[in-house]
Image (cartoon, rainbow, N blue to C red):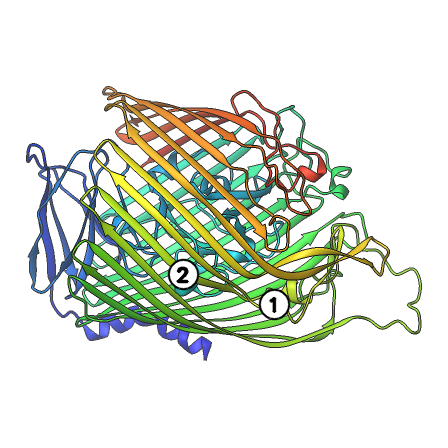
Amino acid sequence: MIRYILAILLLLPQFSYAIGEIKNNTLTGRVTDSADGVGLPGVSIFIPELQKGTVSDANGSYQLANLPNSKITVQFSFIGYESSINTISIVKENTKLDISLPFTSVTTQDVVVSGGFPSAQHENTVKISVLSNEELKLLSNTSLGEKLANIPGVDVISRSPGVSTPVIRGLSLNNILFLNNGVRMENFQFSTDHPFLVNDQGADHIEVIKGPASLLYGSDAMGGVINILHEKPAPSNTLEADISSHFYSASQGIVSNVGVKESRKNWFWMLRANQQSHKDYKDGGRDYVPNSRFNSKGLQLGFGLVKNIGSFKIYYDYLRPKLGMTTGESVSLVDTDKRTNNYWYQDLTQHILSSRNRLFLGNYKLELNAAYQANQRRLNGDPDSDNFRLVDMDLNTFTYDSKLYFPSSDTNEFLVGIQGMHQSNTNHEAPNRIIPDAKIDDFSVFSLFKKDINRIGLQLGLRYDHRSLYVPEQEAGGHSHAEAEEEEHEEDEDHEEETIHINRNFDNMNASLGITYHLNDKLLFRSNIATGFRAPNLAELSQNGLHGDRYEVGDTNLDPQRSLESDLGVHYHSNIHTLDFSLFYNRVYDYIYLSPTNEIAPDDSGFIYRYSQQDAKLYGGELALDLALNSFIKYQANYAMVIGKKDQGGRLPYIPQHKFKNSIRFSAKGNRFFKSPFVNLSWKHAFEQKHPSQFETKTAAYDLVAIQAGSNFKIAKLESNLLLSVDNLFNEKYVDHLSSLKMLGFYNPGRNFNVKFTLKI
């Protein structure tokens, strides 16, 4: 059945040709400066639902053709001006929309799509933070996790720049969900050593939901959602290309990225390829961190057909990272200052084929999406040993989702949807098995209702989920970060191998209520209360053996985690500043955690650690300020804190240090050679973590200073950009509380010079 669904989705573009054109609906207008009425050239006009856009001409005029008879959202954006986000109804062949954009000195809002309905950030009852395309271009961090940590309330667990996983308000791993262009990512994310395989090269922007999103996305979204949106197609009837190169001194890292895309009247295509290579990085003491090297290759392809009956898109994503593992075994084997992965590294491969489609059926809208992921994980150890390949698993996942948007008015919106997943994990001949062979099937139905009453916006949601998990009878196992040894003696006659067999079903109901109150055009209040859930993962249910240096035992009878979170937010903005303040309290029932026992492990490797459950709570908040002191000086500051406690005593793991970040940016008009040059100074203070969890130790406070300078300029009429930056300017020798290398005595990266050059053709 799955292959028939996928075939139908892939054939939708051909189906659209068969039914032909209905009407040649066009949207035209002119974009002007609100102060003097002068037309603005180069304004981006974009329709997220169709992935279709254009730019205004020298007079500020624009035109978009072949639009559906429907209600659509149109965003007008231009650097230095406040974005205009408009929801309009196309009911005739020629619709006109003139827009005046006011000047602003601070960041403006974007259209967000992760909250169910495409809408402006200020109109959404769920707070969705955004890293825009312009912000991503300026971030010099080595890993995607470190880039996400620039959002208040988001942090990163890191073994090295190549092995990192995000934390949202104190929850991580299987408690948060990663989306690649709307596709649910599945790649063994139950361990800090298994990072999400997502490539941010070429991303248009990243949306982050902080708090339970199980209503929209199901299990694993109880802590939040991160959605990386692919780059936009080129403006209509244009061909664009870009190339960039990025150098990092701390790891001698080189990142290369090239992209080409074209849009015509009814179709578009895009291609992007990237490669990165890093040596072992140096810490603040100028010491190498052995085997922290990593290498990666990536490819992204996209094709889309946009007609007045809808949009039909097919994407292919390929990623092949090789991630060095700094372990007790690898430290003595590797030669530092090397680039190639030879000892103790993860050899990972991921393929994603996705089809994302939207049909306009009269006053109804229908989304039909499907994706297939093939994920291969290999752990390679010492090539001189008898067992070089220690782990070899394939995780294949098919996901689908469909949403039906009912006819809406200016004040009401309503949708119903279904989602599902079929997943299989298969172990091969490698000696170690992290998780068993298994099959998982998900199915869910949900609905979302949104209503505006004067200055009040309400959003209600309800969802039912069913998960079926089947593990056929097989030998239970785990794996260690040590060489697999040959058996040197026969097993005792009375010894029986531990076996595992699981056949369980999980059912859950979730609900959410969100309210937004606009006191005036500048001040709004936002409040939400929502439930979330997570089914136990395979490791928690089935682990029975060494995992790293601990003997871990799962529990086949674990209950699902459930949560109830409430949050309150205040947002104030003007053309010179924005202020965001939020508080949250998250009650987690049956929190799953690992705990030592007084039982001795069968191999005498120490005590057995068992997965247990008890209730817990997380609470804290974020504060962010963006202030334009004048047209040339901007100041930004944010503070984030989270506290996590178990009800029966003790702290939750992976709770980040409280952090205060601020920066000041000096910019100038430039001249005919350099456009918009700037210098940015930043300082981050991480407070002491005095309350570690059971397996952690206290972490001292630290301070990091960075400086960045850059400018746009032209080379033979081609647009280019040069960024120079220095992270950890004073080469501080520090360790973050969420560093996985802390227990091994290694520190975070030291002074890091960055050079990034981009050329746009």
Q: Which residue is mark 1?
A: 425
Given residues 435 and 358, the one toward you in this image is 435
Residue type (three-letter) at the residue carrying disc 1: Asn
Q: Secondary structure at mark 1?
A: strand
Given residues 120 and 21, the one toward you in this image is 120
Location of residue 449 with respect to 99 vertically, above or below: below
**Residue at the image position 65 percent from the left and 23 percent from the top:** 285
**Residue at the image position 66 percent from the left and 34 percent from the top:** 338
Name the side, left or right, on which 345 lies relative to 574: right
Q: The N terminus is located in which quarter?
A: bottom left
Q: Quadrant of residue 471?
A: bottom right
Q: Which mark is residue 530?
A: 2
Q: Quadrant of residue 41?
A: top left
- Circle 1 packing at 10 Å, graded few (<14), some (14-19), many (20+), is some
| Residue 268 x/y as whole percent | 28, 55
| Residue 301 x/y as whole percent | 40, 54
Given residues 275 and 45, the one toward you in this image is 45
Given residues 541 and 26, the one toward you in this image is 541
| Residue 576 x/y as whole percent | 23, 31
**Residue at the image position 51 percent from the left and 26 percent from the top:** 704
Name the side, left or right, on which 443 lies relative to 103: right
Residue type (three-letter) at the residue carrying disc 2: Ala
Cα–Cα span, label 2 and label 1: 32 Å
Residue 626 seen in render: yes
- Toward the front, the furthest residue is 648
Q: Secondary structure at mark 2?
A: strand
Location of residue 118 with respect to 323 vertically, above or below: below
Q: The C terminus is located in which quarter?
A: top left
Q: How many marks?
A: 2
Query: Which callout, 2 or 1, points at the residue further toward the start of the chain?
Result: 1
Location of residue 403 with respect to 375 vertically, above or below: below
Name the side, left or right, on which 55 lies relative to 284: left
